[in-house]
């Protein structure tokens, strides 16, 4: 997760005091039927002035499932709960 625009968007949302939560989208099949594995936490790549990272504050949820449909179903089933656990800055 080294794409600069991802780090930019996270930093922008943080600086704008927007609520944040992350969902690791992995386990989805590509056109060849192969599934991917979880990548790095993108919030860990954004360092704050206090020396901590956004990952120290914002949860990253990882849906379960052994195939794409199960992963999608898990996201759908848990999204409301995960949103309630997202990080909101005062």
Image (cartoon, rainbow, N blue to C red):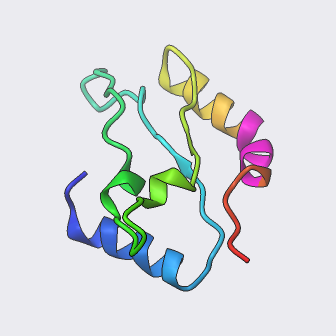
* Bounds of the magenta segment: 77-83
Of residue 1 and residue 31, the one placed in the foreground of this image is 1
3 relative to 11, above or below: above
Q: Quadrant of residue 87?
A: bottom right
Q: Is residue 4 magenta?
A: no
Q: Position of residue 84 (x, y in %)?
A: 79, 52
Residue at horizontal 61 percent and vertical 80 percent from the top: 17
Is residue 53 left or right of 75 when viewed as pictured?
Answer: left
Q: Position of residue 33 (x, y in %)?
A: 31, 21
Count how many numbered circles sit on residues in the image.
0
3 relative to 24, above or below: below
Of residue 21 and residue 87, the one placed in the foreground of this image is 87
Of residue 5 and residue 72, the one placed in the foreground of this image is 5
Residue at horizontal 58 percent and vertical 47 percent from the top: 59
Residue closest to the far front: 50
Tell me the quadrant of the picture where the C terminus can be found: bottom right
Is residue 15 left or right of 40 when viewed as pictured?
Answer: right
Q: Quadrant of residue 47?
A: bottom left
Residue at horizontal 51 percent and vertical 75 percent from the top: 14
Q: Quadrant of residue 52?
A: bottom left
Q: Is residue 81 magenta?
A: yes
Q: Position of residue 51 (x, y in %)?
A: 37, 64
Q: Position of residue 5 (x, y in %)?
A: 28, 72
Residue closest to the far bottom: 16
**Magenta part mainly helix, strand or loop?**
helix
């Amino acid at each position: 997760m080294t794409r600069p625009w991802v780090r930019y968007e996270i930093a922008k949302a943080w600086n704008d005091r927007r609520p944040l939560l992350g969902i690791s989208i992995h386990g989805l099949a590509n056109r060849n039927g192969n599934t991917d594995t979880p990548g790095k936490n993108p919030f860990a790549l954004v360092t704050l002035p206090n020396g901590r990272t956004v990952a120290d504050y914002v949860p990253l949820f990882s849906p379960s499932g052994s195939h794409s449909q199960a992963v999608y179903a898990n996201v759908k089933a848990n999204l409301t709960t995960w949103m309630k656990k997202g990080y909101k800055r005062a």
